[in-house]
Image (spheres, rainbow, N blue to C red):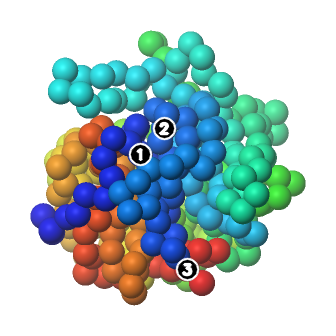
Amino acid sequence: MSETTVLATGLRFPEGPIAMPDGSIILVEIARGTLSRVSDGEISVIADLGGGPNGAAMGPEDWCYVCNNGGFNWIETPSGRILPGEEPDNYSGGRIERVNLVTGVVEVLYTHCNGQPLRGPNDLVFDRTGGFWFTDHGKTRARERDRTGVFYAAADGSYIEEAIFPMEGPNGIGLSPAEDELYVAETPTGRLWAYELAGPGRLSGERRDKADGGRLVQGRPGYYLFDSLAVDAQGNVCVATIMDGGITILKPGGGAAEHVPTEDILTTNICFGGEGLQTAFITLSSTGQLISMPWETPGLALNFLNK
């Protein structure tokens, strides 16, 4: 494992890191229900959103967009780790929210798509036109779980469409450097799917490995689950990996997968920042830590953040 630096401890299941230009890291604390900021080791709350704020991304006009999954039942282990469980009795519904980092205003943009409620929005990515793709991971109950998919939406709350359905617990999502492919990680299958795009918000319709157009990106052997992801400047997809905690580096253009281990089986997300975007910021969720480590390949510059 590369040399790591612990930037913060005591976070309540951190996810969705965003490396800001001022050197701070914005992230969500799912179990705390907040959008928070880590700066010089200090944690401050930007907005109390309730439910289960999950993925986060910067969008147009200084808004930070948040996928809110509505909450979990939380399990605390004897060692003090916290783990997400099933849909809670106080489940508040899935939704897409945005927080204006300048004014502090919070808005709910989407709770439904064509009459179907969002169940557990998980992660999102903006394209260069200002639209965004997001996954709905769904919720699990004692004897059932939701069937969910992938959506495309406008940043101003005016348009939402379900683009891919069904998928098995879709989680991390990202775009290729040319924005001609969409990447979606499924948690329970441990698979990464690539979808060819015909333009912003539009799948090509070409059939690949699946009837919905998904092309399977070569993985690696063993048992693991996939969480959220980030794309590097070379087009590699860096997927946070659960069970054998770490970051799995997948190569849509071909080549063997690699694995960078961490010290938490619930390694949930990665983003890039720092000089030349060559620092990886990684959330270790069950132990409540945000860490950083140098990364060999620079990260891909994100729309509305690094440009």
Q: Nearer the viewer, residue 64 or 270?
A: 64
Q: Return the residue found at the far bottom.
A: 276
Q: Amino acid at mark 1?
A: Pro
Residue 21 place in picture, x, y as percent: 52, 76
Badge 1 crowding class, 10 Å Cα cut-off, few under 14, some 14 to 19, many 20 or more, is many
Q: Rounded to the nearest whole Å, what is the CA distance between mark 2 and mark 3?
A: 25 Å
Q: Earlier in the sequence, mark 1 or mark 2?
A: 1
Residue 269 place in picture, x, y as percent: 39, 54
Q: Secondary structure at mark 1?
A: strand
Q: Is residue 263 above or below residue 303?
A: above
* Residues marked 1 and 3 touching at CB (< 8 Å): no
Q: Is residue 140 above or below residue 12?
A: above
Q: Is residue 183 visible?
A: no
Rendered image: mark on residue 306: 3
Q: Secondary structure at mark 2?
A: loop
Label 1: which residue? Answer: 14
Q: Quadrant of residue 249?
A: bottom left
* Residues marked 1 and 2 touching at CB (< 8 Å): yes
Q: Amino acid at mark 2?
A: Ile
Q: Amino acid at mark 3?
A: Asn
Label 2: which residue? Answer: 30
Q: Earlier in the sequence, mark 2 or mark 3?
A: 2
Q: Is residue 246 left or right of residue 73?
A: left
Q: Is residue 267 visible?
A: yes
Q: Earlier in the sequence, mark 1 or mark 3?
A: 1
